[in-house]
């Protein structure tokens, strides 16, 4: 193995913006971590939100989803599972207050080996500017997965207590699920997992009508178009008893709509992805029978998660649930059982990240995952 450099290039937060920098120190390896030479990365909404909403500290390295080659082990890595030179993919806590020098948008990143995925043997870059949806058989497609797959898995197996059983004959919960944002990266994988785990009696999705054919191929049973002004009324008229609802878009507007779709006669659980609590719901629609919960994948790393005004304490049970899911789903990905959403590849590596973040934030790209090769 060649000698590692002492500095690298990275995308840093400077004065409220994401900026390319050179001469950056390599991240420190904590116990259980390995260092990867980053090959490809994906942009997620959490990345631009940490920048634009000033969640992250000045100088933090941005980025979460990445694929790379293991170049160095920290203490405590399971060498029966990983070897130097392996291609792995996974989630890095970018824009972090605790470890601001680590993020995916860099030449090197420190990854927690306990929640890392092993890539299929012989995986390679496609070299294409765009990749249609399909099985995860390229490095770019693997870069699109970690946050979306991990989040979808934790929604089902941790939050909704769905058993990790592949294609069971008996439905696990004899009630429908509503997935608002069915064509988002999380939404598309959540639909696939709901179908493969036979988790609910039916899968109801909210998305643009143009995505209907694809989402029904994944397993959706019914689709409502969020462009319709009366979409909530349409849903509640046809499905008045929704007990499990997921806001895959998770904005302060969509959460009001998803919440309004919950059953009025029994207990319901509405899950969002940005930590919204009951005070985010308008008082006139707030109800005691609806439990508003969240899942935040940052907690899989087993450390306190620091935000500007509060800290989420370490959650060992959540971390173990994530480890269990990752080890269980990994061979399914290798076997082609999980399909990625369409991918747009930007050509200029780290230099393109600020533009990619802007395109994601402003909605210039719809129904695609934004990827670049480092």
Image (cartoon, rainbow, N blue to C red):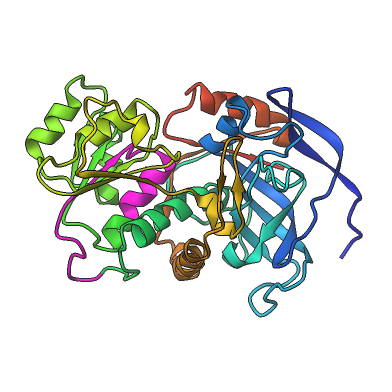
Picture quarter with the N terminus: bottom right
Picture quarter with the C terminus: top right
Residue 224 appears left or right of 183: left
Start-end of magenta stretch: 168-192
- Residue 284 sits in quarter: top left
Q: Nearer the viewer, residue 136 or 189?
A: 189
As drawn, 51 above or below 295: above
Q: Nearer the viewer, residue 154 or 81?
A: 154
Q: Residue at x 21, y 41 (%)?
A: 288
As drawn, 288 above or below 13: below
Where residue 336 sits: x, y (%)? 43, 61
- Residue 74 sits in quarter: bottom right
Residue 373 appears left or right of 177: right
Q: Nearer the viewer, residue 314 or 144?
A: 314
Does the magenta segment cover residue 179?
yes
Where residue 168 sits: x, y (%)? 24, 71
Residue 323 visible to the viewer: yes
Q: Residue at x 21, y 32 (%)?
A: 260
Does the magenta segment cover residue 68?
no
As drawn, 374 above or below 257: below
């Amino acid at each position: 193995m060649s000698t590692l450099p002492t500095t690298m290039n990275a995308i840093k937060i400077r004065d409220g913006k994401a900026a390319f920098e050179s001469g950056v120190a390599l991240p420190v390896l904590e116990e259980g971590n390995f260092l990867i030479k980053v090959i490809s990365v994906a942009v997620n909404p959490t990345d631009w939100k940490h920048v634009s909403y000033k969640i992250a500290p000045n100088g933090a390295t941005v980025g979460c989803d990445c694929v790379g080659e293991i170049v160095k082990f920290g203490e405590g890595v399971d060498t029966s599972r990983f070897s130097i030179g392996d291609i792995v993919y996974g989630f890095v806590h970018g824009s972090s207050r605790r470890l601001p020098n680590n993020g995916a948008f860099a030449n090197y990143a420190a990854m927690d080996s306990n929640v890392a995925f092993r890539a299929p043997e012989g995986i390679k870059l496609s070299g294409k500017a765009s990749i249609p949806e399909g099985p995860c058989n390229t490095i770019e497609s693997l870069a699109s997965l970690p946050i979306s797959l991990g989040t979808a898995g934790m929604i089902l197996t941790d939050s909704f207590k769905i058993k990790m059983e592949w294609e069971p004959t008996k439905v696990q919960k004899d009630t429908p699920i509503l997935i608002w944002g069915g064509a988002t990266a999380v939404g598309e994988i959540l639909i696939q997992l709901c179908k493969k785990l036979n988790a609910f009696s039916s899968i109801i999705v909210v998305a643009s009508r143009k995505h209907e054919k694809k989402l029904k191929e994944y397993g959706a049973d019914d689709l409502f178009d969020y462009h319709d002004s009366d979409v909530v009324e349409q849903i509640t008229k046809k499905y008045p008893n929704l007990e499990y609802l997921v806001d895959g878009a998770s904005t302060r507007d969509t959460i009001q709509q998803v919440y309004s779709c919950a059953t009025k006669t029994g207990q319901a659980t509405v899950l969002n992805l940005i930590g919204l609590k009951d005070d985010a719901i308008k008082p006139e629609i707030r109800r005691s029978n609806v439990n508003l919960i969240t899942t935040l994948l940052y907690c899989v790393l087993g450390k306190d998660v620091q935000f500007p005004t509060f800290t989420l304490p370490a959650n060992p049970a959540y971390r173990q649930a994530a480890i269990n899911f990752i080890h269980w789903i990994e061979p399914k990905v290798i076997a082609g059982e999980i399909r990625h959403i369409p991918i747009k590849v930007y050509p200029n590596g780290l230099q393109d990240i600020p533009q990619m973040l802007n395109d994601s934030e402003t909605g210039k790209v719809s129904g695609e995952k934004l990827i670049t090769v480092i």
